[in-house]
Image (cartoon, helix red, strand yellow):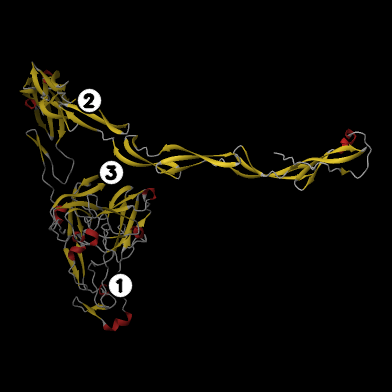
Amino acid sequence: MKKIILPLVVGILISVGVMAYCETSSDCAYLDGYYCDGNLLIEEIGICVDFECYLEPIGSVDCNDDGYSCDGDDLWYYDGYCSGGGCTGEWTYIEDCNDDYTYCDGAEKWGVNGYCSGGSCYEELYLIENCDNNYNYCDGAEVWWADGYCSGGSCYEELTFVEGCNNDYSYCSGSEVIDVDGYCSGGSCWEDSTSMGDCDINYNYCDGAEVWYADGYCSKGSCFKDLSFVDDCNNDYSYCSGDEVWENNGYCDGGGCAEESYAVENCNSYDGFFCNLDEVWESNGYCREGGCLEALTFIEDCNYYDYFNCEDTFVVGEDWYCMGGGCGYEGIAYDCDDGLYCNGQETCQDAACFDGIDIECDDIVGCTNDICNEDIDSCVFTVDDVKCDDENMCTYEYCDLYNDCQYSNEPLAMDCGTCAECDGTGLCIYDELQDSDCDCPNDGCTDDNTDGIIDAFNDYNEAECEAIYTCNECGPTTTEPDGKCKTAMKIPIEQYVSMFSIPLVPDADVTFNDIQNGCNFRMNITYGITYWDPFNEGDDKYVYIDANTILYPGQGYFTTQANECEVIIEGYRFSIDYAGYMGTDNIYEGWNIIGAPSDEVTNFDRVEGNCKVVSGPWGFDAENYEFVRTERLGPGKSYFIKTTSDCNLG
């Protein structure tokens, strides 16, 4: 700070207010000092005048030296004033002159450098760079264009894709493949060319037993081969070497044909003697045209030595035969008598057995059964009253062993029933007076053996049901069989796989569960029954059903059971005419499974109707697990048949 010294007014002494003795001015030096007069700093000293001390101003300084000054790049302001006998002041921060920045002038980037000097801020301008530096550059295999510009005090580049250099390709130079690899370098596309080899490589090679020629060439930047057949080495053949058969095997090896030969068999192995029935033959093996042949020579017939003769009813002698390529014999002696009485006595004549003449049993009585009994070697005659039936309900007839049929006109009221009586002429007459007491016999079938099943085939051997009476409003009765009578059958089901059917027509629809007794499907399967449906698409036409699905008579089924069991069915008989698809009488072209009728069919050829059956019937043998061809159809079984067209059996 610059101090300004003001001139003093000479001759003015200031008394200190207290008189102090002094001899010299040095005695008054303690009075030296400063004081403020506003912003003026006054300096005064003590002086001795007439032995008294006085204060004398000797100068002044103006403390108000305000102004700006720099502290590095900082600009400050100083406010000076006088206080406490001295000059002082306060500093105030104004700004930092170092506010450097950049800006754009067109495409140029300029910099501003701020600084403080002489109490003021100044700026110094300088060019940093020209942003307009446009150029091409590479990004991998791509060429890009960079367009430089200045914005907001900074340089930027606007990038534009120019082209991709990675356009690799191949081309042919004569028979040579040239590979071109495109790349980017220094902002431009370039290409490197490399030879990938010459395609003109020609050679023979083997494809199995064939020789092929490969002719290499270049096309569209790739190697190709024209293949052409040269030769087939597989010229195998057989030939003879003496009595041996040799095999020549041709093959391809290294692009050319080669051959190898080896012996197959020696035809002399066929030499020797052998038997053709009772004849001895000799075989001589030899080779011809690559194969073994046999020259056969007849030696002798062993039967030539046979010798037979009769001794009573016995044929005796020697029976010669061929064995092991030579003749041998065994002695024989057998009786022509077969031990049976009823077929007559057998005899031996000219070393041969002849049958006897059957015993004829006839007592000339028409109502007896005449049979030859082998157990007693004699004829037996028994009476048969049925042969004497005159179909008159009011007469009694019987067979007499010696006098033939005998008849009596004595009426038997029980033959006419409780609703009629014999009129004496041999006829049953309806008695109206008996209406109130009429009790016609039951027309239904009965359980004769109390097995709980109406007419099971344990009751009647042929599983037939005969109505004892047919009741018609209490009128006359008859003992003729009733073909409409309901019957029942038991059908055995084999363990594992079994083919079965329903041999009767039930009153209502039935399922497997309704009629099975003790059956269990294998492995607890649900759909354990199947049938063949000719309407299904494809080769497999099987349809699988459960035990609660309705079964139809005349349709055949498979089932798989874990054990042997049976089905018990009640219903009415049907014939082969009823057999067919799902309870109809229709047979369709191709394969069908049919259910057998109620009675056994002994010869299927007789019941083919208008069908042309080309395969079958085929039943199933559960024991041997195989299909078997048969002409017999058994009730309760099912069979495969194949026909040429839609048709009907009967």
Q: CA distance from mark 1 to mark 2?
A: 116 Å
For label 2, count other residues whose C-alpha is less than 10 Å away and answer few (under 14), some (14-19) or many (20+): some
Q: CA distance from mark 1 to mark 3?
A: 50 Å
Q: Residue at x 29, y 37 (%)?
A: 164
Q: Quadrant of the C terminus?
A: bottom left
Image spot of residue 308 (x, y percent): 9, 29
- For the residues carrying marks 1 and 2, which lies nearer the camera in this image? 2
Please tell me the numbered disc located at residue 195: 2
Nearer the N terminus, badge 1 or badge 3?
1
Image spot of residue 167 (x, y percent): 26, 35
Q: Residue at x 45, y 40 (%)?
A: 110
Which quadrant of the structure image shows residue 396?
bottom left
| Residue 565, placed above or below residue 193 | below
Q: Residue at x 20, y 63 (%)?
A: 386
| Residue 428, placed above or below residue 28 | below
Please state if 257 lies on the left or on the right of 526 as rendered: left
Residue receiving disc 3: 625
Q: Residue furthest top?
A: 242
**Marker count (numbered):** 3
Q: Is residue 139 visible?
A: no
Image spot of residue 518 (x, y percent): 38, 54
Residue type at mark 2 is Ser
Nearer the N terminus, badge 2 or badge 3?
2
Please tell me the numbered disc located at residue 441: 1
Please state if 8 lies on the left or on the right of 385 as rendered: right
- For the residues carrying marks 1 and 3, which lies nearer the camera in this image? 3
Please state if 344 lies on the left or on the right of 157 as rendered: left
Image spot of residue 238 (x, y percent): 10, 22
Which is nearer the eye, 202 or 334? 202
Residue type at mark 3 is Tyr
Identify the secondary structure beneath mark 1: loop
